[in-house]
Image (cartoon, helix red, strand yellow):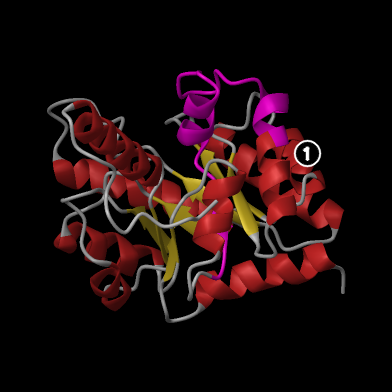
Amino acid sequence: MSDLTSKARTLLDLHSAPEILTLANVWDVVSAQVVAGVPGVRALATASHSIASTFGYKDGENIPLELHLDMVRRIVEAVDLPVSMDFEAGYGNAGDTARRAIEAGVVGGNLEDQMKPLDEAVAAVKAVMEAGRAAGIEFVLNARTDALVRAEAGTPRAQVLDEAIRRGRAFLEAGAPVVFVPGLVAREEIQQVAQALGPQKLTVISVPGVSLPARELQALGVARVSTGPFTQRVALTALQDAATELVAGGGLPAGTRALN
C-alpha cells in the first residue's frame, strides 16, 4: 500500500469513527508543524482564506491556483499526517484541481457548491471522486453546501435547512463521504441535519464564541469540526495584542514558547 493510499484510508477512517475529528486549519509550513505537534492531532486541513491572506489576496479563488498548490505542497512535505486541502469551488475545473492536489500529496479536500444548480454541483463532486479513483486512493471529499450562508434574506429557516439536506444527500449519493454545512451552529439545527444525513456524515465549522464545544458536537453525531480562517485570526489577534502592549511601553507576553 502506498503512503498516499494509506493516508487517504486513515483520513476516511477518522471521519467515520464515532469520535469526532477536530481540525485546527493551517495556512503555512510553521502553522502546520505547530498544529501537527499537538498531542492528539491526527490530520491537518488547510484554509484557503488563510493561505490567500498570507500572500495578500482576498478569499474567493483570487490567489493563483499554482501559488495555492505550492503552499499546500510545502505543508504536505513538512508533516507526516494526512492533509486535506480547501480548494474552494474547484477553480473552474474541480476534477482537474483535485488531480493536481493529489499530485501534491493531498488526500482530502473541501469543495464549495456556491449554490450552483444541483446537477452542476453533483457533477463537480463526481469529478473529484473520479480523480481520487484514478489516482488509486479513497479521496475524502468534504462536499460543502452554501445553502445557509448564501440564503436570501427572509427565506424561512426551515426551507433553508431542507435545501441544505437535499443538497447534502445528493452529494453523499454522488460519492462524497461527508458534507460540510457552514452556518450551522444551533444545537437543534445541527441535530436535525445530522439525523437527516446519517451518522458521521456532517461536518461543521467552529465559530469563536458561538459554536458548541467539540465534545457536544460529537454527541450530536457530527463527524468533523474544523476552524477555517479562525485559527489564523487567533494567531493574528495574539500578534496585534502583543504589538499593542509593546508600543504602549510594555513587553512581550510571558510564557511565549519557541515554536519555530
Viewer-proximal residue among 258 and 221: 258
Q: Is residue 127 visible?
A: no
Residue ID at (42%, 42%): 145
Please tell me how crowded label 1 is: few (under 14), some (14-19), or many (20+) other residues with Cα within 10 Å: some
**Vertical comparison of 23 with 251: above or below:** below
Farthest bottom residue?
18
Number of on-image labels: 1
Which of the 4 image quadrants contains residue 7? Answer: bottom right
Q: Quadrant of the N terminus?
A: bottom right
Residue ID at (26%, 48%): 207
Question: Where does residue 202 sit, x and y in percent of width and height?
Answer: 40, 61
User: Per the image, is 257 magenta?
Assistant: no
Residue ID at (43%, 81%): 18
Q: Can residue 194 be seen in this view?
A: yes
Residue ID at (22%, 26%): 247
Q: Is 103 displayed left or right of 182 in the figure?
A: right
Q: Is 88 displayed left or right of 130 in the figure?
A: left
User: Per the image, is 52 magenta?
Assistant: yes
Magenta residues, as a range?
Answer: 42-70
Q: Is 15 displayed left or right of 188 in the figure?
A: right
Q: Mark 1 points at which residue?
A: 100
Question: Where does residue 203 sit, x and y in percent of width and height?
Answer: 40, 58
Q: What element carries label 1?
A: helix
**Vertical comparison of 161 with 12: above or below:** above
The disc labelled 1 sits on which kind of residue?
A: Arg
Which of the 4 image quadrants contains residue 63? Answer: top right
Viewer-proximal residue among 1 and 227: 227
